[in-house]
Image (cartoon, rainbow, N blue to C red):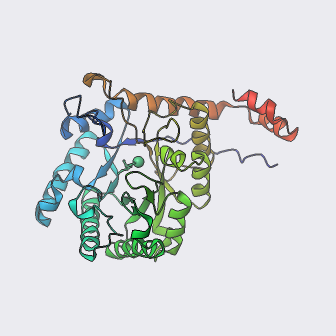
Amino acid sequence: MMMREPFKGTTEYCFSFGPWNIHEGTDPFGPPVREAFSFDEKVGFYRDLGFVGIQFHDDDIVPGIDEKTHAQLIARTKTVKKQLDDHGLTAEVVAPRLWESPQTIDGAYTSNSPKERQYALERSKRCVDIANEIGCKNLVLWLAREGTYIRETKDSAGAVGQILEAINALLEYDPEIRILIEPKPNEPMDIAYIPTIGHAIGLAYASDAQERVGGLIESAHAILAGLEPSDEMGYALYHKKLWSVHLNDQNGLKFDQDKAFGSVNLRRAFNQVQVLEENGYGRNGEFIGLDVKVMRTQPRDISTKHLLSSRRTFLNLLEKVRTFDKEVEQEFITARDYEGFGLLHS
Ligand code: XUL
Ligand code: MN
């Protein structure tokens, strides 16, 4: 058994979250319970909470995007870019919100309707234009509705081809854009076509510019697929294709809970921090993204605590990773005393 290579230097991690992570408490069974913070108010919160990166959807930047002309889209994006500059913030990623339009009810790139597939591609290209204008090279594709409720209604092999075709069209549209696929096994669809990072990386290698297609792993999505998030991260890190993360937590196989990082299973959180830290994540500017939702019960004026606690948990676990005695760990591994090793980490 080889000892892990000691890491050289110290990564200064940068943290990001999306405006949707400060929300009003709506769930499928009930309406909002808190008054919304405006976009401008949210932008004002980032620095104080210890965050420097914003994860965007296209319509977080340009509300009502489908009704806007190209000139309006660019003008609005310039305004937001100025706002970010004024606050010392960076746009980490931009994602086309392809799952809310009445035109993507049955999927976006894999809709059975050619007209709707065309809409999805055009909308994605507009998202690339926004990314360029806001100074960001990372386009996230969460393939939310690329799947089925009734398996027989679509062709799963053909669907992979349709997704790949869309990815290739975007790579060609902008020779510098990078595509980060965020896999998720279900929700909103019953079963999704690209459920894990292995599927996403398969698509990356099959694409016309494999060096520009990678992945974003969300802890909860891996757990929902019945997988170990840190191993999923290790798989992507080996392929040098882990370009962003959505750290959070999940209490079993339920709906996507987006709980605060480490709030359910601290050891699972520790393993994620360790695999990131020990494999050089963050050294090429990758952010520690947190896709966490505050509980519905939380009063409005303190409805950002989930972000504070998730960031703090990451940093506390990082300290543990950095200060663990590797030689002692190695002694337990050499003696194959895995029970003893377990005690070290308990
Ligand atoms: C959905 C999810 C999204 C994406 C961004 O489960 O994780 O928030 O991360 O669109
Ligand atoms: Mn996510």
Exactly how many numbered labels are in the figure? 0
The image position of residue 333, as x and y in percent, is: 82, 40
Which residue is found at the position 23% from the left and 64% from the top?
Answer: 103
Q: Nearer the viewer, residue 106 or 305?
A: 106
Q: Against 295, is 238 above or below?
A: below
Left of 143 or right of it: where is 232?
right
Which residue is found at the position 40% from the left and 51% from the top?
Answer: 187
Can the viewer see residue 328?
A: no
Q: Against 256, is 120 above or below?
A: below
Question: Extreme right residue here?
Answer: 335
Q: Quadrant of residue 174?
A: bottom left
Q: Nearer the viewer, residue 90 or 292?
A: 292
Q: Name the quadrant of the C terminus.
A: top right
Can the viewer see residue 287?
A: yes
Q: Quadrant of residue 316?
A: top right
The image position of residue 300, as x and y in percent, is: 25, 25
Which residue is found at the position 56% from the left and 36% from the top?
Answer: 269
Left of 228 or right of it: where is 49?
left
Left of 200 or right of it: where is 28?
left
Q: Quadrant of residue 129?
A: bottom left
Left of 272 or right of it: where is 181?
left
Q: Nearer the viewer, residue 56 or 296?
A: 296
Q: Nearer the viewer, residue 120 or 269?
A: 120
The image position of residue 92, as x and y in percent, is: 36, 51
